[in-house]
Image (cartoon, rainbow, N blue to C red):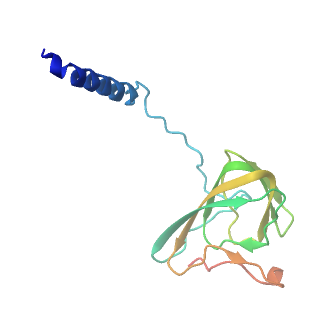
Amino acid sequence: MNNAYLPNFIVLTFIILFISCSYPKPTNREIIVTKILDTNTSWDGKSFYYPQGTPQVSSYIVEIDSGKTLDFHCHPVPTFAYILEGTVEVETSDGLTKTFKSGDAFVEVMNTWHKGKAIEAPLKILVFYASAENIPISIKANNNFLDKKCFLENK
């Protein structure tokens, strides 16, 4: 080898070694699929249904500060939740409560007035709504909310 090319050869060799060492190595690990939810009822034991119309799925990450309680609201569409971090206590207007912690997956109550309280922060919830075009995913309660129904007719 010509000595004039030796410095370039050494630099190129180090670059190739660096790239080959930093590139992720294939593993022999198989694909792992973990079921987190398989249900036909919401957490209160009631069944749910999908709205008619053109399907529309929405997804959000909801973050709530510790000690914060959401106002009463309801979901007229199936709502699926996965707790990423923290703990939440959900309470219905009838006084039924359930606590969910990090790693829990559930179907939220449908057509039922409820509120949630972050009892351990930071609370992060990944939420999926199975709605249809022009149908709200959530309805906030007003002053006389207990006198009003929160649902769309199941036709």
Give the side of residue 142 with respect to residue 60, left or right: right
Of residues 44 and 99, the one nearer the viewer is: 99
Farthest residue to the front: give it.
Answer: 4
Q: Residue 90, located in which quarter of the rendered image?
A: bottom right
Q: Is residue 24 above or below residue 84?
A: above
Of residues 13 and 5, the one nearer the viewer is: 5
Q: At which x and y percent is residue 119?
A: 82, 53
Q: Is residue 62 above or below residue 76?
A: above
Image quarter of the C terminus: bottom right
Q: Residue at x 68, y 54 (%)?
A: 124
Farthest residue to the left: give it.
Answer: 2
Image quarter of the N terminus: top left
Q: At which x and y percent is residue 144?
A: 83, 85
Q: Is residue 118 above or below residue 26?
A: below
Q: Residue 18, located in which quarter of the rendered image?
A: top left
Q: At which x and y percent is residue 68?
A: 82, 62
Give the side of residue 99 with respect to residue 19, left or right: right
Of residues 104 and 42, the one nearer the viewer is: 104
Q: Residue at x 79, y 72 (%)?
A: 71
Give the side of residue 22 with respect to residue 10, left or right: right
Q: At which x and y percent is residue 77?
A: 61, 70
Of residues 148 and 90, the one nearer the viewer is: 90
- Number of numbered discs on residues: 0
Farthest residue to the right: give it.
Answer: 95
Q: Residue at x 66, y 74 (%)?
A: 138
Q: Residue at x 61, y 73 (%)?
A: 137
